[in-house]
Image (spheres, grey):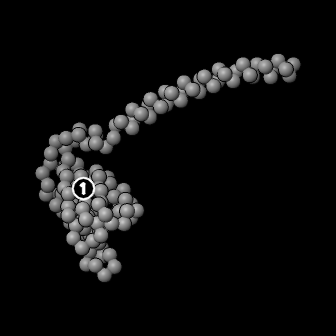
Amino acid sequence: MKIQSFEKSWVQVPLLTSYYIKLFAVWEIIATFVASINDESIRKLMKTKHVQYQTHGTCSQLIDVTADENDVIQQVFFLGGCNGNLQGISQLVRGQKIDDVIPRLNGIRCGTKGTSCPDQLCRALEQLKEAPVVEG
């Protein structure tokens, strides 16, 4: 009896393997589709504001920031500066309203400098508030 049950399990393994391979193929198709719907394509569907702000007095040289028509921050990129910290700040402010972010970061200083990257982000956000809204 054990031999028959053993043989049946070997027959079932290829069937299960085939099932999982098909399931994985479908998953790959879905994952590829979802990955193709990135922030850029979504941004084209909405009205946005965008500025590139040249920083002053910090290690970063440029801040590229985008918000939607409701002043909700969509993306922030820093050129230069402390990469890990600035990526963290970018992720933390994403999805936040401009008017909520400015009071939290305004006036932060970096060492003996009179400003910081978060403070310079506030300057960029102030410009962004005044920027024209463009469609996709």
Residue name at image x 86 percent, y 22 percent:
2
List the residue tagged with mark 1.
65
Relative to 49, is 123 above or below? below
Q: Quadrant of the C terminus?
A: top left
Residue 30 lies left or right of residue 117; in this view the side is right
Looking at the image, residue 135 sits to the left or right of residue 32; the answer is: left
Please name the residue shown 47% across and 31% down the image. Answer: 28
Q: Is residue 46 visible?
A: yes
- The quarter of the picture where residue 10 lies is top right
Characterize the local packing of mark 1: few (<14), some (14-19) or many (20 or more) Cα atoms within 10 angstroms: many
Residue 34 place in picture, x, y as percent: 39, 35
Q: In the image, is residue 118 above or below residue 72?
A: below
5 lies left or right of 99: right
Residue 29 lies in what quarter of the image?
top left
Q: Position of residue 60 (x, y in %)?
A: 29, 66
Rendered-image quadrant of the N terminus: top right
Number of numbered labels in the structure image: 1
Q: As shown in the figure, which amino acid type bears the numbered disc 1? A: Val
